[in-house]
Image: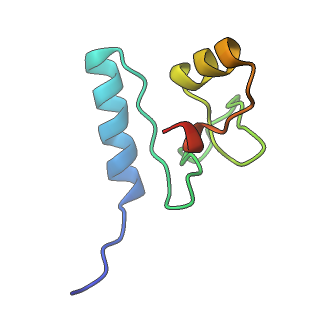
Amino acid sequence: MPSRTLDENAALDAAEHFEASTGVTCLVLDVEGRTILRDGHRGARLDPDGTLPCGFCRTYRAATKKPVACREAH
């Protein structure tokens, strides 16, 4: 069976459309759990492990006072 590769631009397009239509934050992660951002994306506050924390993770961290990485929480 041939290996599948991720079309990052298509995945980012889908995530942006989903977010725009639902108001729910949607991120694209690679197999390592790092957030994939569009080229030139500025101002993103990435965690030290390369992930971009979502609203759920920020809320979880605030409530538990635990520094869990977004990729580990999901």
The outermost residue toward the left is 1
Residue at 48% across, 39% down: 74
Horizontally, residue 47 falls left or right of residue 18, namely right
Q: Is residue 35 above or below residue 73?
A: below
The outermost residue toward the right is 48
Residue at 67% across, 21% down: 61
Residue at 72% across, 30% down: 45
Q: Quadrant of the N terminus?
A: bottom left
Image coordinates for residue 28, horizontal then vertical, percent: 45, 44
Residue at 67% across, 31% down: 44
Number of labels in the image equals 0
Image coordinates for residue 73, horizontal then vertical, percent: 55, 36
Query: Quick one: 70 or 52, which is closer to the camera?
Result: 70
Q: Is residue 64 above or below residue 48?
A: above
The outermost residue toward the front is 64
Image coordinates for residue 70, horizontal then vertical, percent: 59, 37
Query: Hey, which quadrant is residue 40 in on the image?
Result: top right
Horizontally, residue 66 falls left or right of residue 6, namely right
